Image (cartoon, rainbow, N blue to C red):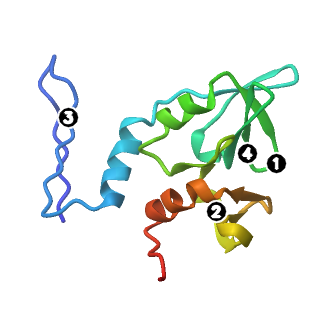
Amino acid sequence: MRIIIESPQPGDEDVVIVRCASPDQRLISMLLSFQTANTELTGYMDDKIVRLNYQDVYYFEANENRVFAYCHSDVYEVKYKLYELEEMFVPLDFVRCSKSLIVNMEKIEYLSPLFSGKLEAHLKNGEKIVISRQYVHSLKAKLGIEEVK
């Protein structure tokens, strides 16, 4: 594979062209995450306003009409609705896992099955979250996990 970087003519916008035989999901995700890398996310904790990097977020949770971003050890309130965050991070490795929760798949260490078709995600910071039955299929699809029949 070759990588070619050219400077655009004055007044031209930056353009990224990818030439490949068959783009896989990983390449598409990488390109889309590059395109959305400037997504601004501001977190609020007590009297602090913090600029959050979406890669540091383990999951977002809606609770009592408020939405929180859970990072490694801190929790910040964010001023977005859960569906807005879901739309913002569609091209990235965030996936809905219940009506009130969106998880960063990069932060999942492993999954374990629970009764009644649910899954439990064990996160890299030691927390555990439950993926409801309704969202198990979409999580498995995004992970590329085949169902055993």
In the depicted structure, whether residue 53 falls above or below residue 123: above
Q: Judge depth for marks 1 and 3 and give the one in front.
A: 1
Q: Quadrant of the N terminus?
A: bottom left
Residue to which mark 1 is pinned: 73
Between 55 and 97, the one lying in front of the other is 97
| Comes first in the chain, label 3 or label 4 | 3
Q: Please tell me whether mark 4 sits on a helix, a strand or a loop.
A: loop
Residue to which mark 2 is pinned: 108
Residue to which mark 4 is pinned: 71
Instruction: Name which residue lies at 36% across and 37% down.
Output: 35
Evaluate if marks 3 and 4 touch, with contact meaning CB atoms under 8 Å apart: no
Gap in angstroms between the C-alphas marked 3 and 4: 33 Å
Gap in angstroms between the C-alphas marked 4 and 1: 6 Å
Instruction: Name which residue lies at 19% across and 45% down.
Output: 5
| Comes first in the chain, label 1 or label 3 | 3
Residue to which mark 3 is pinned: 15
Q: Please tell me whether mark 3 sits on a helix, a strand or a loop.
A: loop
Looking at the rendered structure, the kind of residue marked 4 is: Cys
Instruction: Name which residue lies at 60% across and 38% down.
Output: 53
Gap in angstroms between the C-alphas marked 2 and 3: 33 Å
- Residue reaching furthest front? 116
